[in-house]
Amino acid sequence: MACAGPRPEPGAEPGRSRVSRYVHDTAGDATVVVTGTGSVVGWTRSAQDLLGYRADEVVGRSAGFLLDMPDDPVRVSKIAERCRAGVGWRGVADVRRRDGGRIELDLRVSAAFHLDGRECFLVTGRERRPERIVGQSVLDAFLAGSPIGMAVLNTDLRYVWMNETLERFSGVPHEHRVGRTLGDVLPGLEAESIETLMRGVLDTGVPVIDYEYLGWTWADPHREHAYSTSYLPLTDGDGQVTGLCYMVLDVTDRWNAQQRLALVNDASASIGSTLDVLRTAQELADFAVPRFADLVLVDLLEPVVSPDDPGTWPPGVGLSAPELTRTATTDAAQPSAAPRAGMRRAGMRSVREGCPEALSRVGEPVDFLPPPHDLRFLVEGEPVLIPVLDPDDHAWLADQPARTASIRAHGLHSLICVPMRARDTVLGLTTFIRSTNPASFEPDDVLPAREMVARAAVCVDNARRYTQEHHSALTLQRSLLPHTLRGGTALDVASSYLPADAKDGVGGDWFDVIPLSGARVALVVGDVVGHGIGAAATMGRLRTAVHTLADMDLPPDELLAHLDDLVLRLSDEEAEGDGRGGTPVLGASCLYAVYDPVTQWCTMARAGHPPPVVVAPDGRVSFPELPAGPPLGLGTMPFETARITLPEGSLIGLYTDGLIEGRDRDADLGMSRLGGALAQRGLSLDALCATVVEQLVPVPQPDDVALLLARTHELSPDHVASWEIPTDPAAVAGARAEAARQLSAWDLEELAMTTELIVSELVTNAVRYATGPIRLRLLRQSVLTCEVSDTSSTSPRLRHARTTDEGGRGLFLVAQLTRRWGTRYTPDGKIIWTEQELPATPP
């Protein structure tokens, strides 16, 4: 039976598609390359699978044996001419299989191209199977209407054929491509790297699948596209590579989606690295330029920029969205009274040096709101997208000549405005603008812009809330610390306190100088575990307790024992309560020292605190070895005291561990550095204190730092008078006389009468109710102190005598005549003391 040659579909013109009752099985397509003389020069595995012939059985032979040569050479000639003219042909042919059977194929012959100097045609075919379907040829759609661009290149990587889709991708017509390389026609692509990749395919015969790259094309020169390409070698019957075929798919939408997702993910890691409002706003601007926008402006409401000084915006309104909504609604009803948005520039970044496009600098007020220019936009509005920012097309820019001039001068052409809100709190507005990037913002860009701003808004709100708490804690802590330090005539004192950096917050460090009876002075320094308002509140409670216990004139070890009991009790109360509104005490350390300028003794005890540092008058530095008591709140070990002598001019320093535990966290090394810094000569006490802190405190500062310095003075013997008093009522008169003579010697005759009355009452009580020996002592310093000591442990009690009582009014009179009075206990008994103000010295 004669085999008919290739024929067009019935009723169809060559090269055109028509409605057909056949459909192709896409699994059976075959592709071969045929020369102008009819010889097969390229045979694919799909052709072998479809027809059964191996490449070595076909390549080099005439394709006629497959078709038995058609009976109509004129028609064949017309087909060839049509393909040489660049039109191509499509039709149907009966083809012989290797097993002797025959198969009807839909054929498509490409326009002619040259491969290795020979005229060639790309012939593709698929088996036709009767099906009840109406549609366009799958083969025609594959080659002509497919979204995949296809091309054939020779071994010199010059184009010999391409389909229409590739022309649309590149914008370069067929006639300008054929005979040229990729670098010749599309210099904007990664021509050199792609051609290197294709040479590798020609050299190895190994295809490359799904290679992706970015580039600009003549078809869309203002937008970067992403392409996925595959490079396949063409081989002859001997397996030699004779050319290359590649396919291109535009994956720009997929790539843009991936980039937007990566943008949002990266924003989470780059924005909010600190608890600082302005720094967080600047991080948003820095992150988005230039990868998303060419200019980013972050404007925050006034109370957000200054959370420690909230002010009001609008008048009488805070930051909450419901309140702001009510105000905006009221303002809308009275447009003439509507306030502008009270915001300040918190961050900005531009691809241009110095942000010349911006009308306001960081820290300056701004009032820009995009259309509809309503405060409700900040509360409940959606992001505003202006793809084309043309001042001539936007009436709202007519009354803003400065902004209009900047838009035109710098080519600002596209804009997205996103309100910043977090946790029902209105924070401000972020504006993204493009200028040097010619691509306008698209609707798909609004989502990543919203996500970036949402991430930054949460971080800004966290920073705002933290700053408010930090400021409150710092204010509380400083209100609890002493505002003035009074060392009297016994000590010159100086102090320095630095709160921890913002990262860790305010801590519970404190220090104090407490005047005691008998010209003595107490020095105390402590450190509460933890940071924040809770630690500051606990510090205030402990400082108050120390003052109360110090007024009882307790020795250092007893004072710390009572303080330890207090911490335990507070901890138990917190554990037994529901935990709401409480201040948990996690532990604390303390050092308490009492200096007596008369004896020059300093008695100390510590509870888990570093020892003091002492600089002797000759410059020698030492750290006295005090018994190491446990931290407060453990209640496991007793506290012990130690006593050292501090000659005139000695320097003693009390400090918290934040001063000695630097970056290396080595306390011993820190103490050595502290001693060296305190040994400096020629500085006043205040200057020395500031210098030491500046030299030793690490940056960043991980913990609170407190330093208390005191330089000792001796109360000289001519300011002290002391007498032994016999346990005889008759000795009271002699005691009054001795006191009067001493006051006369000190030129304090104005105090003689009240002092005689005080001495008479105190000595009389000692003689009447105590046992000897009895001692009277007068001290002249910043006040006049009168002390009467005895061996009794019974303390006198102040009471109101009845009119019929013969006694009981002595201590009441003493209390009325003195500034203060009290009792302190000694190992041998007790001391009753009083203090009187010295008369003013005439100018």
Image: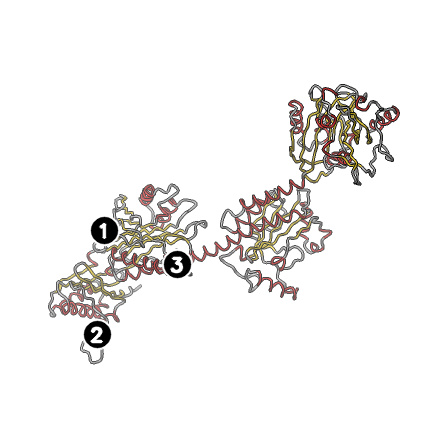
Residue 418 on image: x %, y % = 62, 52
Q: Are marks 3 and 2 in contact (CB under 8 Å)?
A: no
- Foreground: disc 1 or disc 2: 1
Gap between marks 3 and 2 measured at Cα: 45 Å
What label sits on residue 642 in the rendered view?
A: 1
Query: Is residue 597 shown above or below 354?
Result: below
In front of the other: 384 or 819: 384
Which quadrant of the figure contains the N terminus?
A: top right
The answer to which image quadrant residue 217 occupies is top right
Which residue lies under the disc numbered 2? Answer: 809
The answer to which image quadrant residue 159 occupies is top right
Gap between marks 1 and 3 measured at Cα: 33 Å
Q: Residues within 10 Å of mark 3 (few under 14, many from 20)?
A: some
| N-term-proximal mark, 1 vs 3 | 3
Residue 293 on image: x %, y % = 63, 45
Colour mode of the rendering: secondary structure
| N-term-proximal mark, 1 vs 2 | 1
What label sits on residue 583 in the rendered view?
A: 3
- Residue drawn at the location 35% of the way across and 42% of the way down: 666
Judged left or right of residue 93, residue 183 is left
Which quadrant of the figure contains the C terminus?
A: bottom left
